[in-house]
Amino acid sequence: MAMNPSPSESSLPAQVGPVLDELVGAARTALADNLRSVVLFGSAAEGQLRATSDVNLIMVLRCFERAQVDGLREALRMAHAAARVAVMFVLEAELPVAAEAFAVKFADIGRRRRVLYGEDVFARLTPSREAQIQRLKQVLVNLTLRLRSRYALVSLREAQLAVVLADAVGPLRAAAAAMLELEGQPAASPKVAFVTVAQSLGVTGEMLAQLSEARETSALPAGVAGTVLFRLLELAGQMRGRVERLGAHAA
């Protein structure tokens, strides 16, 4: 198996790189030849990790052997506690099906990933256009439903509502990047894609700045979070309409 540059030699925060080094080493020992690849994806892979972000990894296996995984459990628990490392286990044979079922996530992995160990199994994995359109609609509808529920539940506490907004930005950025790619105008990053799409749909620079503030600090000035959330609901609906037009055009 090929080895790749150590996470501790990358642009990751100082406390995260060594944690990933240890986890990758533990995975190599516990999973042995069953381990096909370890891939870092999302904000950590592009050097945009926030203090409250999960560090997302995929471990690609030939098979999910109970005894081997049991040998990795303590290292997983320690990595999660130390740096919020979240690991997805996927079998190599499952990759094509998973890419279709979770097309937006896997398209995002295609854009933002770093191989920490093994081969780049995602280099030749591209979800179909039809799957991406369908999944985009599902993601945007699901986000809309969750935002409504969270507003009704926590809006008496604006600090909690700001955290809801911060958590919503990531999925919207990924959706915007996927949408622009489907429209034939890919952006440099999900963040740039979201700004491009949001501005094209009438979102002001002030609101974009407020979303960035919520994402970076999990806080907003008094009286702001509720208004931003309702505008975000409107934006998600506008994006869904745009995706539906893509689907109609494809048909």
Image (tube, grey):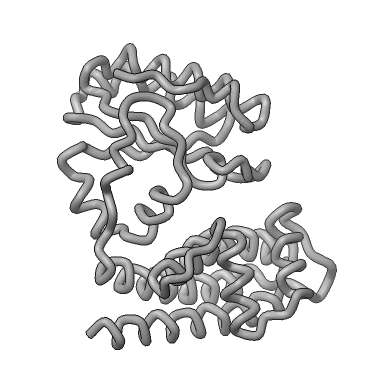
- How many numbered marks are there? 0
Q: Horizontally, is 14 left or right of 251 in the view?
A: right
In the rendered image, residue 181, in percent from the top left (x then y), is placed at 42, 67
In the rendered image, residue 139, in percent from the top left (x then y), is placed at 40, 68
Residues 133 and 126: in front is 126
137 over 2 or under it: above or below: below
167 over 134 or under it: above or below: above
In the rendered image, residue 157, in percent from the top left (x then y), is placed at 72, 66
Q: Residue at x 59, y 28 (%)?
A: 10
Q: Quadrant of the C terminus?
A: bottom left
Q: Residue at x 71, y 70 (%)?
A: 208
Q: Residue furthest right?
A: 221
Q: Horizontally, is 138 left or right of 22 in the view?
A: left
Q: Quadrant of the N terminus?
A: top left
Q: Residue at x 60, y 84 (%)?
A: 201
Quadrant hosting residue 60: top left
Quadrant hosting residue 37: top left
Residues 65 and 213: in front is 213
Quadrant hosting residue 36: top left
Q: Horizontally, is 135 left or right of 8 in the view?
A: left
Asked whether residue 152 appears in the rendered view, the answer is no
Q: Residue at x 37, y 23 (%)?
A: 73
Q: Residue furthest front?
A: 184
Asked whether residue 145 appears in the rendered view, the answer is yes
In the rendered image, residue 131, in percent from the top left (x then y), is placed at 26, 67
